[in-house]
Amino acid sequence: MSDARAPLARAPLIDGRELVIEPDAARVGERTHSIARIEEARLLFLRPETIGLRMADVGLVEYTVARPGDGQAALEAIYQLRPDLRRPDLPPPLPVAPPGYEVLSPTPPPFTPVAPASPPPAGASAAPPPGMYPPAPGAFPYPLYPPPPPGPAPFPPEVIQAYGPEPNRRHATLTPRPRGAGQLIDATFRLAARRFGPIFALAIIVAFLPNLALGALTVAISQLSGENPFAAAPNPLTQFQQAASGQTPTTTTTSTAATPTDALVGLLTMAALVATLLVAGWTVAALTVAARDATLGRPISVAGCAREGWRRLWPTLSTLVITNVILLIIAIPGLGFSLGMILTLVAPPPGSTPLPAGSGPLVVALAAGSAVVTLALLAWVWPRLTLAPTAAALGMPAPIRSTWSLVSGGAWRVFAVLLAVAAITAVFSVPATLAQFFSNGLAELALIPLAQLIAAPLSALARTLTVYDQRLRREGYALFQQERVATPDQPAERVMNPATGRD
């Protein structure tokens, strides 16, 4: 005898939990949604597959499943129990299983209503067992295909054999086997070396030349303001110590009316700020597209990547700004408090009340504790946010939410990869930035564009490889089918965008 409370569907979620559809309720961990209290059930997003349940008591709840097809199977189970929830405009469910699964029957078997064996006991749920309600007209009864096995969609044996016994040692592109942190770092530099020509040419177009133009604009603004952009700037450490102790240099200013030159300087400064943001977004988007093609084993078109990066400029730039603002909101209060406590101890402002004797260790402990807590929070948040601009450039929906859930299963591995690549690229970018204090013109016109020429492609490759590695752990062979990944025994394909007719 079959159990009347046996689950009709199970759908693993991307956050590690499981959505279970039972005859009387939908359960996610300790959370229970009564089937009788569902007011609406529908598919919200297809990539990643997300279903929404509107409840009479809590409103809309969303669940993103880990495997394609599981969300629609869960909805079909709900529609079987509550046919009134199926909207009239919904098409009947297709008898097509997710990749790697076999359809049981393309036609619905005849329906036979089943009466309950005995009246339900007092206090039991009034929801009928499966089979008491006929399916909606034209709909196939659930299940359409056998329950998928646990874990991501398995790879066919011929695909695994095509990559060989140690695919990550032989190939720097995406393989059926996920990579560890060290392997991702190694793959980043191997891909950069093997696809050096097109990636380097693209970096010249979207990183070097735009930053060179921005540097020339900055030098022109300095010259119009009456400053020598090639002169050594004042020692920033001395100025910082003077500001911390309340000593400010004495300057004499005269009130004069604004001149046309001042108006031009203000206009050019605003234009430089806007252009800097546009260049940053375009650089990330275009190089991410090239890194995607390199990761998936496709040929890299320099002009095509530059065009596609420009089309994805706005989502990439907006995500880049939002994630950096969030990180600054976390970093500034905690690190600012630590710095303020240290300055109060080392160089108290003139006229301030001196600290009590013996309070130095307590001040240092408070400053160190605030810094440690802030850095730990940044280490937890940074890997979950820093991949969002890459996801936006790849066209993933809701990039911040997608990468947050995608990285949650391997945040420290992602952190190690991105930190290692950032430390390597810092060897070029940090000296170029510090050179502004010795000669701003030299840094803007030579060092910063050259540093971006090296750092930007490496960062894009590392982040793109990490995104696809995390997706591989969740989706398995479904990722290869969706992205049309080129295997070693077949030529690469380029995916065409049906809206534009371009890849």
Image (cartoon, helix red, strand yellow):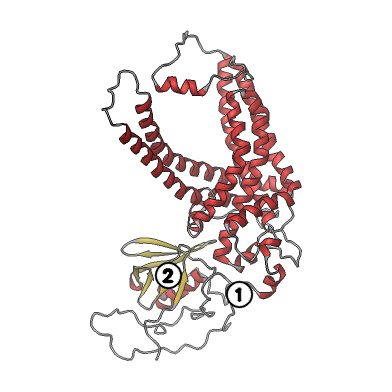
Name the quadrant of the N terminus: bottom left
Q: Judge by depth and name the residue closer to the eye, 162 or 438.
A: 438
Residue 300, how many percent across, how many down?
A: 73, 51
Q: Which residue is mark 1?
A: 100
The Cα–Cα distance between marks 1 and 2, rounded to whole angstroms, is: 21 Å
Residue 196, how many percent across, how many down?
A: 74, 47
Disc 2 crowd rating (10 Å Cα; few below 14, some 14-19, many 20+) is many
Q: Judge by depth and name the residue closer to the eye, 163 or 63.
A: 163
Q: Which residue is mark 2?
A: 19
* 138 in relation to 41, above or below: below
Question: Disc 1 residue type?
Answer: Gly
Tell whether 142 sits left or right of 455: left
How many numbered discs? Answer: 2
Disc 1 crowd rating (10 Å Cα; few below 14, some 14-19, many 20+) is few
Q: Judge by depth and name the residue closer to the eye, 43 or 89.
A: 43
Element type at mark 1: loop
Tell whether 252 sits left or right of 420: left
Question: Disc 2 residue type?
Answer: Leu
* 309 in relation to 83, above or below: above
- The image quadrant of residue 267 is top right
Element type at mark 2: strand
Residue 21, how many percent across, how many down?
A: 41, 74
At 57% from the left and 20% from the top, the residue drawn is 233
Tell whether 471 sits left or right of 31: right
Lower position in the chain sequence, tag 1 or tag 2: 2
Confirm or deny contact between disc 1 and disc 2 (CB under 8 A): no
At 53% from the left and 79% from the top, the residue drawn is 144
Quick one: which residue is furthest to the front in this view? 358
Residue 268, how many percent across, how many down?
A: 59, 24
